[in-house]
Amino acid sequence: MRKEAVLLLFDAQHPCWNEETVSLAGEDPQALPALEREGLLTKEGAFYVLSDAGVERFRFEAASAYYDAAPGTTPKDPRKMLRRNRMELLLRRSFLGRWGLKEPRPGACLPWFPSLTKEELFRRETGDTLVWTYTEHPSVRLLLDRYPLPSNANVLPPNLQEMRAFLHAKNISVSHLELDLLLLQHYDFEQYMHVPPHPNDELGFLNTDRLYCRLAPPSLAGRNLHRDEMDAVCWDIGRLHLFLLWQRRVFLPWFFDRDTEEQDAINWWFWITDTEEEALVLQRSLMPLGEALSRPALPLDLWVLSLEALSTRTAREETFWDLFAETAHSIARTQ
């Protein structure tokens, strides 16, 4: 029983664990009650968190192992954090990504601007009509004129310091969209590892595929989305639109939708449900909006995926393309 290894699972990004998630991480779940008896873990309902003594022991063990991570503390929404943890573990084990490197970032925050209200971002009309109103907002138009799409790879990227000074001068504030998980796939890692970094690539997106994951509301089985839940979907995707807009024009121009070898770099958004039944309910609810959700942010694919579908797989796929062809439900695809 490697109790120290289990204790070090409880870092700041993964503060909640149970027997299933510890097993998914390849460790012995019997270490959980043993660590609880030692006073290093506290059991709260169906999950464990570090005790005060566990926080101190985590720091000691992490320093001894040269592990650069902060200990986790009890979160405001432990059930959500446990779902995040399970989602990350199931995704990581479900495909090999051979010759590549999977980089999970739970709780990643994506910068978007200008900081618009929901009413300024979109409007839902009668029926299933969705109108993206942000495209005509004066601040967005101002930025679009100032930062056009590059015509080729040799166009110099904008100066970030000057861009931020411009935002400040025009009173344009920056907000952040928190994801449940951002999973970067560094494909053909050895081939690209010697490529110099891009000067504006603050998120490290160069030569990666990006999977943006949002946990869907629980208990969707047997019902459609409420209006406020549909609005939350549009709110999330609209903020993603603005994030993608400036990644393509400012932060990683020319190389956001293609890599340094002129291969496509993908951006796929996933709503993650607990069960397959919930996934089908969510797909049925969102299909009437369909491609309207992804326009005008193409190329962008939208999917629904269940943790149940991932957990019941008995073999790992070679790539996430193979995995999602078998498990995910499409809402909108880039043609």
Image (cartoon, rainbow, N blue to C red):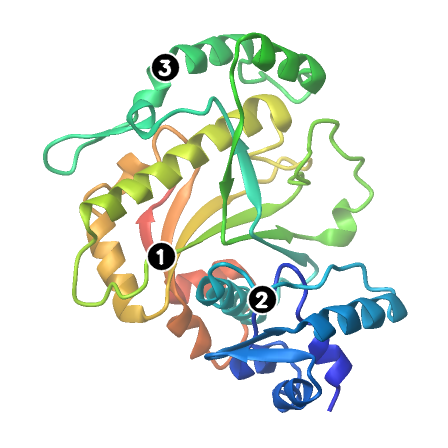
Q: Residue at x 15, y 38 (%)?
A: 128
Which residue is pictured at 26% across the width and 55% down the height? 283
Q: Is residue 8 visible in this depiction of the protein?
A: no
* Tags 2 and 1 touching, CB below 8 Å: no
For label 3, the residue is: 137
What's the residue at 83%, 72% (across, down)? 61
Residue lying at 31% horizontally and 43% vertically, measured from the top left: 232
Per the image, label 2 sits on a secondary structure element best described as: helix
Few, some or many residues within 10 Å of mark 2 (<14, 14–19, 20+): some
The crowding category of the residue bearing disc 3, from other C-alpha atoms within 10 Å (few below 14, some 14 to 19, many at least 20), is few
Q: Say which element carries label 3.
A: loop
Give coordinates of residue 159: x percent, y percent. Answer: 70, 16
- Location of mark 2 (residue): 92
- Which three-letter amino acid code belongs to the residue tagged 2? Arg
Q: Position of residue 149 (x, y in %)?
A: 54, 18
> Gap between marks 2 and 3, in whole Å?
39 Å
Type of residue at label 3?
His
Where residue 140 appears, x then y in whole percent? 44, 16
Name the residue tied to disc 1.
216
Pointer 1 or 3: first along the chain? 3
In the rendered image, the quadrant that contains the N terminus is bottom right
In the figure, is residue 278 to the left or right of 99?
Answer: left
Q: Horizontally, is 134 left or right of 240 in the view?
A: left
Q: How far apart are marks 2 and 1 (CA)?
A: 19 Å
